[in-house]
Image: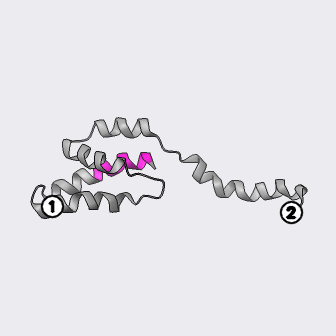
Amino acid sequence: MRLRCLPLLGLFLLPALAPILAHAADPAAATACAGQLSADGQMFYGKVAGRMTPTTDIREELEGVGRPLVMAGTMSRTTARAAAEAAGECLKQLK
């Protein structure tokens, strides 16, 4: 590859990488958001936040936490859904 083609390659790669670089994780904002959650929401957040990566499927992780609670009768489906949705909004800031 010739070095004179390198700037041209950059012109094509920059638009592809811009969305990735523009959306960076913000742990401080996620923690502040989690502080405003209900106790159930904080529990969901706490169990999923440690496993977050840029490729984590938040919905799948939250279902993995909530489903056993609902099946065991520890939490109602309505309560689990509301807590998971609220925690999910905070978890998005960790991606």
| Residue in view at x 23 percent, y 46 percent | 43
> Residue 32, image x and y in percent?
35, 35
Label 2 Cα neighbours within 10 Å, binned few <14 / some 14-19 / many ≥20: few
SS for tag 2?
Answer: loop
Residue placed furthest toward the front = 50
Q: In the drawing, does residue 20 fall left or right of residue 84?
A: right
| Of the image marks 2 and 1, the number of the one nearer the N terminus | 2
The type of residue carrying mark 1 is Val
Quarter the N terminus occupies: bottom right
Image color mode: one colour
- Magenta residues span 85-94
| Residue 56 horizontal/vertical position (percent) | 42, 58
- Indicate whether residue 50 is drawn in magenta: no
Q: Which residue is mark 1?
A: 70
Percent coordinates x, y for residue 3 in the rendering: 88, 55
> Who is closer to the viewer here, 5 or 2?
2
Residues tagged 2 and 1 counted as in contact (Cβ below 8 A): no
Figure check: 69 above or below 49: below
SS for dot 1: helix
